[in-house]
């Protein structure tokens, strides 16, 4: 009898243990640094970060069995923070460049974008060549800034993407250089309800090739390999293209890598 009692007791304790373990086994957090001023990739809906990359990342985290936690910071702090190990991952429409590869481990690119020129309707600037000697706004530490500095434009850099747009709207610069898909979203939103002559316009000359990927600190090679596998699956089964379609964004697949 005594034996039976202790057996039952042990059983009860065991199941209790299993229960508490189950309720405590919350998924490991995966902290993702992002600058949500970059529609349709990441932007705010109220206080919530939403967008193409948010959905891709949530998908990846689900497959990794981790809980995606998005931490909002300025774009120019994303890569530095990631490299310093402050975050698990950087997600910000980040273009893979050779210079960035020196301090950052990137996943394979999942799409291609390009830099675009935005001007006011009626502007005398109609192509890249017309930017020579002109004042151009960009977001700080972006590939747009690199591109404009390399071309010797008179560059005005802003921490927030919206301020780079505002500089053009207010006439403080002649043009605004920014990634094409984000230009399309922001200009569409700005133009809504405006008279034709007060609108912004995107010039159709694509000036660079920008492969987007997610950023990690060195030392995460195994994890990045795993994520590359997941990404590859999402590319092949059409998940990534479908996410772009959901946000009404044209999708360009990266070259096979
Ligand atoms: N693709 C560009 C770059 O990597 C711009 C990214 C800006 N991202 C943002 N979330 N504001 O430099």
Image (cartoon, rainbow, N blue to C red):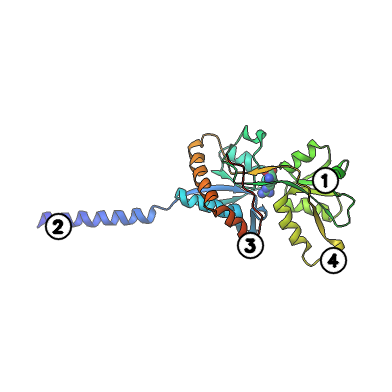
Side of 134 where 185 appears, left or right: left
Residue 42, by quadrant, is bottom right
The residue under the point 32% across, 57% down is: 19
State if disc 1 and disc 2 touch (CB < 8 Å): no
| Residue 74 image point, x, y percent | 67, 47
Reading the image, the residue beneath label 4 is: 195
> Spatial distance from mark 3 to mark 1, Cα to Cα?
30 Å
The residue under the point 46% across, 50% down is: 63
Q: Earlier in the sequence, mark 3 or mark 2?
A: 2
Reading the image, the residue beneath label 2 is: 5
**Near-viewer residue (238 or 137):** 238
Q: Earlier in the sequence, mark 3 or mark 1?
A: 3
> Spatial distance from mark 4 to mark 2, Cα to Cα?
84 Å
Judging from the image, what secondary structure is the residue with disc 1 in? strand
State if disc 2 and disc 3 touch (CB < 8 Å): no
> Is the N terminus in the top left, top right, bottom left or bottom right quadrant?
bottom left
């Amino acid at each position: 009898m005594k034996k039976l009692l202790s057996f039952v007791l042990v059983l009860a304790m065991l199941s209790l243990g299993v229960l508490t373990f189950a309720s405590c086994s919350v998924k490991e957090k995966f902290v993702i640094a992002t600058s949500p001023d970059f529609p349709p990739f990441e932007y705010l809906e109220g206080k919530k970060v939403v967008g193409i990359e948010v959905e891709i990342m949530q998908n990846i985290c689900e497959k990794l069995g981790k809980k995606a936690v998005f931490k909002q910071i300025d774009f120019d702090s994303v890569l530095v923070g990631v490299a310093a190990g402050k975050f698990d991952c950087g997600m910000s429409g980040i273009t893979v460049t050779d210079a960035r590869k020196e301090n950052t481990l990137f996943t394979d690119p999942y799409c291609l974008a390009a830099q675009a020129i935005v001007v006011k309707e009626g502007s005398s600037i109609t192509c890249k060549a017309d930017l020579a000697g002109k004042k151009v706004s960009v977001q700080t530490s972006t590939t747009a800034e690199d591109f404009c500095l390399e071309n010797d434009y008179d560059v005005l850099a802003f921490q927030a993407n919206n301020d780079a747009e505002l500089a053009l709207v207010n006439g403080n610069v002649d043009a605004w250089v920014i990634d094409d898909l984000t230009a399309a979203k922001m200009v569409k939103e700005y133009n809504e309800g405006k008279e034709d002559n007060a609108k912004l316009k995107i010039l159709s000359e694509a000036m660079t090739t920008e492969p987007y990927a997610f950023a990690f600190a060195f030392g995460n090679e195994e994890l990045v390999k795993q994520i590359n596998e997941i990404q590859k699956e999402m590319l092949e089964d059409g998940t990534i293209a479908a996410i772009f379609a959901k946000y009404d964004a044209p999708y360009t697949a990266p070259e096979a890598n």
